[in-house]
Image: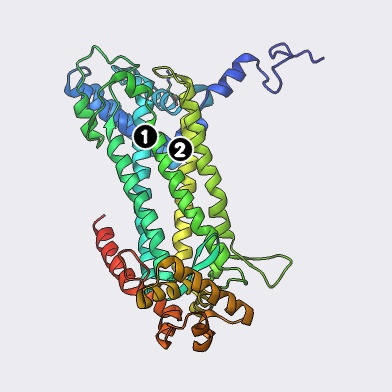
Amino acid sequence: MSDKKTSNQMWGGRFASGPAAIMEAINASISFDRKLYAQDIRGSIAHSEMLAQTGIVSAADQEKIAHGLNTILKEIEAGTFEFSTRLEDIHMNIEARLADLIGPAAGRLHTARSRNDQVAVDLRLWVKDECFRVAEALKGLIEALLARADEHAATVMPGFTHMQAAQPVTFGHHCMAYVEMFARDLSRVRDAIERMDESPLGAAALAGTSFPIDRHATAKALGFREPTRNSLDSVSDRDFALEFLAVAAICATHLSRLAEEIIIWSTPQFGFIRLSDSFSTGSSIMPQKKNPDAAELVRGKTGRVTGHLVGLLTVMKGMPLTYGKDMQEDKESVFDAAETLDLMLAAMTGMVSDMTVNAAAMKKAAGSGHATATDLADWLVRTLGLPFREAHHVTGRAVALAEEKKVGLEKLSLEDLQAINPGITADIFSVLAVQNSVKSRTSFGGTAPSEVRRQIRSWKRRIAKA
Ligand code: ARG
C-alpha cells in the first residue's frame, strides 16, 4: 500500500493532492470555455457601460474596467495570457487578470451580475455568430449545387427507389432535390437565430437584481433584439444551444445522404462521377484505387454531430430550475458540433464544385432496367384509353418479353408489342427513349429539363436575396 498522505488510497488514484485536485479537475471548464473569451469581454464591456450610465459605478472606474478588458483581449489574442485551472473558468480567469491590471475597480464589474447570466449571454453570442457562419456556408453549398444543376438540367440519369432504377430523371433534378433540403436547413438556422436573439444578461444569479440596471441597453449594445423576460428561464434555458444542435444534426444528415450518393456514384461499378484528386486519396497498397475519403468522413462525422444533440438533450432533461453545474456540459457539444459541421459543409461544397460528371455513364444506366416501363403504361392509358391497372398489366407482359429476349424495352419490335396489345402503334417508341420520357414529365416539380430550369431560376433569385 502506498503511504500517500494527501490522496485517498481508494479513490485518490492519479490525483496527487487529494480531494481538492479531483474537485479542481471535475469542476474546471477553462480548457474548453476559453473559446468564449471574446464574447465574455464583449459582455463585460457592455455591462460596465450600462453600470456607468445608470450611475451604479463611476465613469472613472468604468473607464479603467474597459481599458483593462481590452488589454486582456489583446493578451489572449497574442497568446501571452496565462490561463489557470485553479481559476476554474473563463469568467474568473478574466476577472482575476483584471484585478491584477487595474486593482480594486475590477471588483465593481460583477455588480448586478452573476456567472449564471454571464455564461448564458456568452454562449448565446457564440452560438448566434456560429449560426450566421452556418447560414453563409449553406448559401455557398446551395449556389454550388445550383451551378451543377444548371449545367446538367438535361443530363439523364436513373432515378431510384429501393436503390433500384425506377424512372429516368435528370442529374440537375437530383441536385435540385438537395437544394430543397439545404434551403430548409438555411430557413431553420434563420428561425433559430430569431428565437435566440434575446439577451439573458441582467437576470443575475436567478432572480434579477435590486440595482437599477437597464437590460434593454445591454441587450441593444450586444446586438440582441431585446432582453429575455423571465430571470429564472434566462439562466436555465439552453434551447438556443439545443436548436443549433438540432439544425446541425438535420443538416449533417442531409450532408451524409449526399455523401453516401457520391460514394456510390464514384464506384467503378456506377462510374457516374469522378471526384477531383483534392477530395480523394489513393490506397497505400492498391495502386488502382481512388478512395472517396472526404465523402466518407462527411458521412462518418454525422454520427458525432447527432451524438452531441442527444448528449445535450440528455443533460437538460433532468434539470430543475434554475442553473446547475450540469449545464457546464453544454459547451463541448456545441463547439465540437460547430467545428465539425463547418468542415463538413466546406468539404461538401468543394466536392460538389469539383466533381466531374460522366453524362454518358448516367445515360446508359438510365436506359437499363426497363426504366421507361411507366411511360409505356402511361402511353397505353393516354392513347388507347386503357384503365391504368390494365395498362400496368400489359406493360408487365412487355417487360417479361424483353427480359426473355435479353433486350431493353425500347428494343422490342412493333410486332412483339402488337402481339401483346394489337392497338399499339409505332408512336409508342417516342416515349420509350429515356430523353423523351424525361422531357414529358412537365408537371410542377417534375423532372423535365424545362421544369428543372424554371426551379433553378427561381432558387437563384431566392438565394441571392437570402
Ligand atoms: N463555468 C460555468 C458554466 O459553464 C459558469 C457558471 C458558473 N456558475 C455557478 N453558479 N457556478 O456553466
Of residues 452 and 308, the one drawn nearer to the viewer in this rendering: 452
Q: Position of residue 280 (x, y in %)?
A: 58, 65
Which quadrant of the figure contains the C terminus? bottom left
The residue where tag 2 is placed is 334
Mark 1 and ligand 1: say if the CB distance to the nearest ligand atom is below 8 Å: no
Residue at 22% of width from left, 24% of height from top? Answer: 215
Q: Secondary structure at mark 1?
A: helix
Image position of 76 with respect to 435: above or below = above
Disc 1 crowd rating (10 Å Cα; few below 14, some 14-19, many 20+) is some
- Quadrant field for ligand 1: top left
Residue 51 is left or right of residue 276, and the answer is: left
Q: What is the three-letter code of the residue carrying label 1?
A: Phe
Amino acid type, label 2: Val
Coordinates of residue 327 in the picture (x, y in percent): 46, 25
For the point 43% across and 74% down, which residue is it? 375
The first of marks 1 and 2 along the sequence is 1
Q: Is label 2 within 8 A of ligand 1 (CB to nearest ligand atom)?
A: no
User: Which quadrant would the N terminus be assigned to in this image?
Assistant: top right
Q: Residue furthest right?
A: 1
Q: Is residue 309 visible?
A: yes
Locate residue 156: give its quadrant: bottom left
Q: Which residue is mark 1?
A: 240
Mark 1 or mark 2: which is in front?
A: 1
* Residue 268, quarter of the rendered image: bottom right
